[in-house]
Image (cartoon, helix red, strand yellow):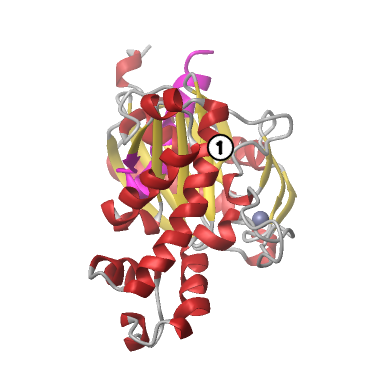
Amino acid sequence: MMMVEKKWFIGVDLGGTTIKLAFIDYYGEIQNKWEIPTDKSDEGRHITTHIARALDDKMTEVGVSNDRFVGIGMGAPGFIEMETGFIYQAVNIGWKDFPLKDKLEIETGLPVIIDNDANIAALGEMWRGAGDGAQDLLCVTLGTGVGGGIISRGAIIHGTNGMAGEIGHITSITDGGVQCNCGKTGCLETVASATGIVRTAKDTIDSYPESLLHNKDEITARDVFEAYGSGDAHATEVVHITTFHLGLAIGNLANALNPSKIVIGGGVSKAGDALLTPLKKEFQKFALPRVKEGADFAIATLGNDAGVIGGAWLVKTKIMQKS
Ligand SMILES: [Zn+2]
């Protein structure tokens, strides 16, 4: 019997274009990490075989075998039944009624635990990233969409059917908002995602003939924050609109959840203080005094590794403790 501290975990983070894989040790250090392309052909039915083969190949290369590993923790997009690891639907993968956990367990011979991709990224940040030991975290990912993960007392909140933490679909614009991918209109995602920031910039640019953004062929969220850093009035307006809606949503969530850390991740978070400073100002307006005293903001630190590290954490805490 191998000492538990010598055991490793496998983290898998499934995205629409790539699958990130990693061997992670007992302490959450990545030992090997690599990527394979996501093959969406035939409604994504080859994905589990590709993962199993990629793991076998890497184990051979590294010189380890299955008995080194406790199990696989995997993050997947879409609507997931947590207990069974069954995917009801993952539109950008092609899965519909797909028994992900069962298939991956059969193909790899290892126990598998599945969670939503945003949730495992939040667990990764809690364990080895910006969470810094906090047990009550609110994680908001600002990318092409807005994702979220809520951790209370160290555990992800899933809700009654797995939908908790869908921060991106909190309604920000109650009347006349833009259509969201979820079917509603005016979701936070339509305003505060990279896509939403660019849309706001385009919608308001005509009122600012001097805007630095007129010089860009294709405006990006990064351009907006750069122009904001140069004191551009138009970019300042766009950042104000964005951080107002984010601060309102996060302030309201914080009043309900009382987190100790609010972690902001995703591509837009690369703006750093240009985002955090105005965001904190808006948040302060909406959070109760003791709520804001208890909450620190931080930018996510793990980047693309958050998902695989969170997957390893799930294996360590959910599979290892049982065995
Ligand atoms: Zn929505």
Picture coordinates of residue 151, whole percent (x, y) = 50, 28
Picture coordinates of residue 323, whole percent (x, y) = 51, 13
Residue shown at 66% from the left, 62% from the top? 180
Q: Quadrant of ligand 1?
A: bottom right
- Farthest left residue in view: 230
Where is the N terminus found, in terms of image quarters? top left
- Up/down of 206 relative to 36, above or below: below
Residue 284 shows in the view: yes
- Determine which quarter of the picture holds residue 87: top right
Picture coordinates of residue 174, whole percent (x, y) = 69, 56
Provide the major secondary structure of the magenta segment: helix
Between residue 262 and residue 211, name the one nearer to us: 211
Tell me the kind of residue under disc 1: Asn
Left or right, residue 79 beside residue 22 = right
Question: Mark 1 falls on what kind of element?
Answer: helix
- Determine which quarter of the picture holds residue 86: top right
- Up/down of 214 relative to 241, above or below: below
Left or right, residue 36 beside residue 252 = left
Magenta-highlighted residues: 298-323
Residue shown at 27% from the left, 69% from the top? 226
Residue 45 shows in the view: no
Residue shown at 47% from the left, 66% from the top? 197
Label 1 crowd bin: few (<14), some (14–19), many (20+), radius 10 Å: some
Picture coordinates of residue 236, whole percent (x, y) = 36, 66
Residue shown at 34% from the left, 43% from the top? 300
What residue would you read off at disc 1? 252
